[in-house]
Amino acid sequence: MLMQEPTEEMIKEWKDIYNKSKGSLKPNKKEGLEIKDNLKEN
C-alpha cells in the first residue's frame, strides 16, 4: 500500500522495471487437474 502519492520518478522506475522483466513474468496460474494431483500427493 502506498502511503504517499507516487512521484513521476517512481512511476518511471516502475515502468522501467516492468519493461525489463515483462518477458519473464508468468502468472501463478495452474490447471485444475494439476491442483488436484498436488492435493492428492500431500
Image (tube, rainbow, N blue to C red):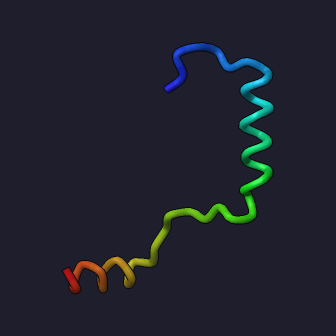
On the image, the x and y values in percent for residue 15 come to 77, 40
Q: Is residue 7 above or below residue 25?
A: above
Q: Is residue 1 above or below residue 15?
A: above
Residue 4 higher or lower than 33, as above or below: above
Q: Position of residue 25 (x, y in %)?
A: 65, 61
- Asked whether, in this view, residue 33 is left or right of residue 21, the answer is left
What is the count of numbered marks?
0
Towards the viewer: 4 or 13 = 13
Q: Position of residue 28 (x, y in %)?
A: 50, 64
Residue 17 left/right relative to 25 = right
Q: Residue at x 54, y 22 (%)?
A: 2
Q: Is residue 9 left or right of residue 39?
A: right
Q: Is residue 22 above or below residue 30?
A: above
| Residue nearest the viewer, comparing 36 with 1 | 1
Q: Residue furthest top?
A: 4
Q: Residue at position x 46%, y 73% from top?
A: 30
Q: Quadrant of residue 6?
A: top right
Q: In terms of image quadrants, where is residue 14?
A: top right
- Which one is nearer the viewer's eye here, 36 or 26? 26
- Which quarter of the rendered picture does the C terminus lie within? bottom left
Among the 4 quarters of the image, the one containing residue 36: bottom left
Q: Residue at x 24, y 78 (%)?
A: 39
Residue under the point 39% across and 82% down: 34
